[in-house]
Amino acid sequence: MKFNFLFLTKKDPQASYEIPKRMTVTTDLYDPLFTKKTLPDLTLIDRELSSEEISHLESLCTAYTVVYTSASFETQEMRPFLKMKLGIRISEANIQGLIDNAVLSFGRKSVFGKHPVNSMHVSETFAGSISFEGNSFLQLSGEFGDDFTEVMNWRYNLPLEVETPLELWPEYTVYGEMEIILVVRRMIQGTADGYTEKMIYTQKDLERPVVISASGNPEYLALSIAARGNGTLRIGSIHYRNVAKGIGLFMAGGRRFADADREEFFYYFNPMDLKPPLNVYFSGYRTAEGFEAYPLMKSLGAPFMLFSDPRLEGGAFYLGSEEYEEEIASLIMDAAAYLGFTKDEIILSGISMGTYGATYYSTKVLPHAVIIAKPLMSAGNIANNLRSIRPNDFETSLDLLLKNEQDQTPEAIERMNRVMWDALDAADFSHTEFAISYMIHDDYDRTAYADLLDSLGKRNISIYGKGVIGRHNDNTDAVVHWFESAYKKILRDDFGRER
């Protein structure tokens, strides 16, 4: 796959720099190569631009892919463009380095995923107790010995591409007087030579994602955990992803946050045209790591944020530690501050699991509007409904209940339900409107819409509701169409946006 590099300079790039074979370089921003479907992967500005050129670049470049070489280019005309695209300044001396790393940093093949708990194998020599916390964690307790000894491994090897470094992030907690190490063994694909290198990472190393560099050969990585001492190890999924290289996870601008418990979320912010509102979208349940609804949110034309929750099988409803939840709310407000917006110029939104995130964080942000479709509000009831209403469907709801309440009793179910309703009942939504599309025969949370009406309606809060025939996972096309229409209506009526 070719990498398209727009290099706005007075020099001849081919004569001045070494250009990789995979890179197509042009100095013409009106090059017919660029269309709505084929945009520059990277734009480097090394000369002053006219007003016409700046205007053209606004539609040509995406956020986080604009680099410029001099503070002198930060003219009054240029500043809004650089703010829209979150331009990155580098020195001229670093241009060759940028070119060398551009394909890896900006135009990579995406590699990401996780090895879950059901892909683990416990060593036959481990003599302690073994238990599982649903599908979330494997727990090993006992004496691990004085020397590091392998106690578990992941059954499946990870492929390591020729040019693509990977970062690893294991979910784990250690209790007692014990230590662990992550052991990574390399072997070249297609050979019988065995392991070519053994790498060891301590708990100190694991405070940050472990980066496995590419060697120039296609390889496999075998992963295991060794332990010593006495105590308990809780080990969950191990996540693997492209190395961000400062540019982004999954896409340019994608970021991650991990709290002290090693629990993560991902986020992305695009300033677009810098005009209100800031649209915030919480991804729904997804087993694949990454972001949801990027094309839809970008098509609306307004600044937007995306959030994604990679925990459990496909997400943990954006609930977490105080640190975890405060960071999500702070990032939303920080993005609004960057744009010069108030909370009355923010919209929170989501579909299915994303409705929980949008509604829950609306109690902290108090936005102008909340747009949700297929609402899931009572997380305890969702787990309870697995027993008789939708057997063997969405078992992650049981993991969520166990994760948050450490039990599955009726009392635990009610406590889990109250997390949302206590937050909603205490929030001041006097300046917030709700647009809600719900499934009439929803088999996940059958009373979500009625419960929302009960909580919000008695406070004279503006609510627009739309029922759609079907169960939770039925008629998704109609729901997404309504969701987009509701967004466009609020953007038009409340913010004067016609698009």
Image (cartoon, helix red, strand yellow):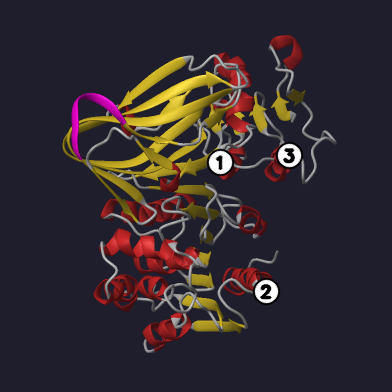
Give the amino acid type for the residue marked by disc 3 in the picture.
Leu
Residue, x 62% and y 18% (percent of image)? 100
| Span colored in magenta | 142-150
Q: In the visual, does 230 lie left or right of 54?
A: left
Q: Secondary structure at mark 2?
A: helix
Q: Which residue is mark 2?
A: 478
**What is the spatial separation of the Cα atoms under label 2 and label 3, in whole angstroms?**
31 Å
Q: Main secondary structure of the magenta part?
A: strand
**Measured along the vertical axis of the image, is residue 350 above or below residue 90?**
below
Q: Secondary structure at mark 1?
A: loop
Q: Indicate the position of residue 452 as horizontal and vertical percent values.
A: 42, 81
Residue 418 sits in quarter: bottom left
Q: Residues within 10 Å of mark 2 (few under 14, many from 20)?
A: few
**What is the spatial separation of the Cα atoms under label 3 and label 1, in whole angstroms?**
18 Å
Of tags 2 and 3, the one toward the viewer is 2
Q: Which residue is mark 3?
A: 39
Residue 317 sits in quarter: bottom left
**Measured along the vertical axis of the image, is residue 283 above or below residue 168?**
below
| Viewer-closest of 266 and 397 | 397
Q: Residues within 10 Å of mark 3 (few under 14, many from 20)?
A: some
